[in-house]
Image (spheres, rainbow, N blue to C red):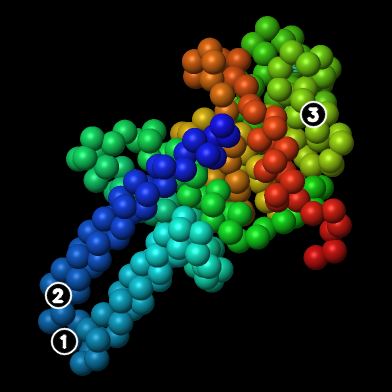
Amino acid sequence: MSSLEALRPKKRLFLGLLLASEFFVALVLYAFWRVSYLGLENIFEYLPALFGALLILISGISFGAVCNMVLAIKGLPTLKLFHRYSVGLIKWLFPLAVKIGKLFGFKRRQLEGSFIAVSNLIFFKSGIKVPAKKLLVLSPHCLQLSSCPHKITRDPNNCKRCGRCNVGDLMKLSDELGFTFFVATGGTLARQVVKKIRPQAVLAIACERDLMSGIQDVYPLPAVGVLNIRPNGPCNNTRVDMDEVRRVLKNITKDDDNE
Ligand code: SF4
């Protein structure tokens, strides 16, 4: 089973908590509007109405984006207009969703996995396809065999493609398809690479926590995540399902670069 399939049941949990967060924020905004009403009216007669309309517009777009995600999960047609707001919205509401989730006994990691599933779904629903040479594939350093003597974090071409870890497989795939492959030791380096390469999309391989932050870090650049496999525990000789990587690559790349 692919990691995307494995995460499917969790999407509802995430969206439920996201909606709960939306309601909470809407209530706070309403309370704020009520409290500031008289003060605003003293400044300008129509200011409370204008301010209220602005808050309603912001809340409306947020609810629209979440409803759009629900439609995507149900396999129904979605509005592309809202796709671009989805990851940004999640970025702002996620900390609150985690707090609400904790009250119901859900762990942060469950929500992170669910976020990745929803975020990937939005990516695929958006129909984003980029030429392979405009795609950046990022992987964590723990994908490299810990006993490998070759330094690949600054230049993955130092990998000898010996086949003992998936770094070699990804390098071969990069040679074959033409995407840029980079091994990042952290978010800062990943952001530097994105700035330097200027890709049109990112395929990130990592654990739930790093994918969650990575996808948000590169926003508004579209990013799709593939979870790594951790047979030796976190951050140690991790693996990735290469069939899944190929499947995702097939879905998000196109042959020509005629934009
Ligand atoms: S495939 Fe590359 S990175 Fe992995 S062990 Fe071999 S030389 Fe090292």
Label 1 sits on what residue type? Asn
Give 199 or 254, whichever is nearer the viewer.
Answer: 254
Q: In the image, is the residue at mark 3 within 8 Å of ligand 1 by its beta carbon?
A: yes
Q: Residue at x 30, y 82 (%)?
A: 53
Note whether 131 is above or below 185 in the view shown: below
> For the residue carrying disc 2, how many other residues have a C-alpha within 10 Å: few (<14), some (14-19), or many (20+)?
few
The part of the image, by quadrant, that contains residue 167 is top right
Q: Which residue is mark 1?
A: 42
Relative image position of residue 63 (x, y in whole percent): 36, 67
Q: Gap between marks 1 and 2, in whole Å?
A: 14 Å
Label 2 sits on what residue type? Arg
Disc 3 is placed on an element classified as helix
Note whether 90 is above or below 10 in the view shown: below
Q: Is residue 34 visible?
A: yes
> For the residue carrying disc 1, how many other residues have a C-alpha within 10 Å: few (<14), some (14-19), or many (20+)?
few
Q: Residue at x 35, y 35 (%)?
A: 108
Disc 2 is placed on an element classified as helix
Left or right, 58 with respect to 69, comes to: left
User: Tag on residue 171?
Assistant: 3
